[in-house]
Image (tube, helix red, strand yellow):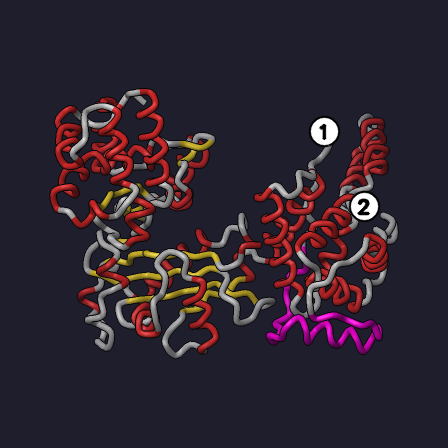
Amino acid sequence: MISHPVIWAFRSSVRCLRHRTLLKATQRALDVSGLRWYSTPIRVGVTGMEEILARVVAPLPTYETRDKCPPSPESNSLEFMHFYSSLVKEDKLSVLTKLSQDFGVDHKSVSELALKLLDTQLRDLATILQVEDRLRYSLTPRYKQLLNHISRVEGGVKFLVDLRADILEIIASKASESAHIRDLNGTLKSLLSEWFSVGLLRLERITWQSPCEILQKISHYEAVHPVRNWTDLKRRVGPYRRCYAFTHAAMPGEPLVVLHVALTEDISDNIQSIVREFATLDSEEDVNKINAAIFYSISSTQAGLQGVELGNYLIKRVVRELQSEFPQMGQFSSLSPIPGFSSWLQGLLSQYKKESRGSDLLSEHEWKEVEQATDSAPGTPAIEALRKLIGTSEWMHSERLSRILEPALMRLCAWYLYGEKRRGYALNPVANFHLQNGATMWRLNWRADTSPRGVANSCGIMVNYRYFLNETSKNSALYLHNKVITTSEQVLGLVSQFQKNSKL
């Protein structure tokens, strides 16, 4: 059987580099090459692009000389880095297209070696293994050498992370349907996965005494619950709070993924009590009041590291850190947003309005209450009134409307998290993340996030994914291999209520 291609391991250690800007790095290249650079985005012709790529992308050494060929000059990597950074978006696409198409795998050589491998199947094992190794080497894209060389210069790894972010944007926006671009993305992702393996990451606790630059980045990168001001940030890294980040030697001063933790007596059911409560800003921690760790925000800071597993390792490392600091702590849980629930619900209501199936979502009594509260007629008008109501946050300020909608929205949300799937796994990305980590879908919380953003995204509902440490490995395996969601009785009860009312 022909072996699958394998990714060559990146060298085992990464030099610890001091942070400097790419401009300074490329300025040194000026002294070597004498080339003139431009500080503003430029448009380049096809001829200039081809000339630079031909110069900086070295030919793939022969199989026999693969370990003897000297590396390309550092100036080549710096030249490409600055050239690419100076381009406008359209020309970046042209360069990446050209790089991936013309400097990729030699398909003719691969085909010839594949046929040769088939011819050697009846020969001795040593011959088969040698041909397999030759085939494996021939599957190396020519541009992979350039990527490896860039990673070794100052600022190179950060450049490649940003380069992949550009590629992901191209793929997501469908600016290019090229299979070569996708292959370039896969190659770069594999390299980044090696370079950012957990063994090369450093766990740092962020405190108010951390460098100002780091604190500013922690504030800027917070994607779940935006930081309002410096006082807010001080609270989030102060008493009864912990903030941790993974960093990498090749990107000094740059947090890669950030986790915020609240230290509480019980498992929290409301985010405002965590991010807006300032009573303990200057207080000393009372260890006797710390029984639970609540993961209330985890943010990846680098778009180019999408798909590179960092967040799950960060949670596991932080759990060990907290267990060491608080041996008595026994409860670990997230307090998670539910992005996408409101938009899913809007789509569902529109579909049911079109099909006149409103009675499948709410009970007869609930529809009557909606009709009275919105002054709408039964049937389609009531469905439309409910859809418009949920599209605003006004209902959250009415005790009557909140009471009317709570049972329906809670069971609909439970179904969205538990029953709506993508390829057999949870449709909701946050649910999918925690379930892969082995957490239990433990509790839905009504009016848990009454901020405009929380109401707009999930009708103010949040969910606890609880980490029972002696069960996470089993739960993770059940989910990943059998697509089984480990769920509490509360969530299952809400799902059961939904199924009784709905004919989805």
Q: Nearer the viewer, residue 152 or 155?
A: 155
**Can you say which quadrant of the picture contains the C terminus?**
top left
Which element carries disc 2, helix, strand or loop? helix
Magenta stretch?
Answer: 10-39
Around disc 1, counting alpha carbons within 10 Å, would you say few (fewer than 14), some (14 to 19), or many (20 or more)?
Answer: few
Quadrant in the rendering for residue 319 = bottom left
Give, as a three-letter code, the residue at label 1: Met
Instruction: Locate residue 454 relative to residue 5 in the image: left or right.
Output: left
Q: Nearer the viewer, residue 381 or 100?
A: 381
Q: Position of residue 293 (x, y in %)?
A: 28, 58
Question: What residue did someone put label 2 on?
Answer: 102
Question: What residue did someone put label 1 on?
Answer: 1
Q: CA distance from mark 2 to mark 1?
A: 30 Å
Q: Position of residue 205 (x, y in %)?
A: 40, 69
Q: Marks 2 and 1: which is nearer the front?
A: 2
Q: Are dots 2 and 1 in contact, CB under 8 Å?
A: no
Q: Residue 242, can we see it? A: yes
Which element carries disc 1, helix, strand or loop? loop
Numbered marks: total? 2
Magenta stretch contains residue 13: yes
The structure residue drawn at horizontal position 82% and vertical position 52%, both measured from the top left corner, is: 46
Q: Position of residue 77 (x, y in %)?
A: 76, 64
Instruction: Locate residue 330 relative to residue 201 in the image: left or right.
Output: left
Q: Position of residue 212 (x, y in %)?
A: 44, 77
Give, as a three-letter code, the residue at label 2: Asp
Question: In the picture shown, does residue 290 fall above or below 382?
Answer: below
The structure residue drawn at horizontal position 45% and vertical position 36%, both measured from the top left corner, is: 480
Instruction: Locate residue 22 relative to residue 340 in the image: left or right.
Output: right
Which badge, 2 or 1, is on the more N-terminal residue?
1
Question: In the picture shown, does residue 279 fall above or below 163?
Answer: below
The structure residue drawn at horizontal position 81% and vertical position 32%, both measured from the top left corner, is: 114
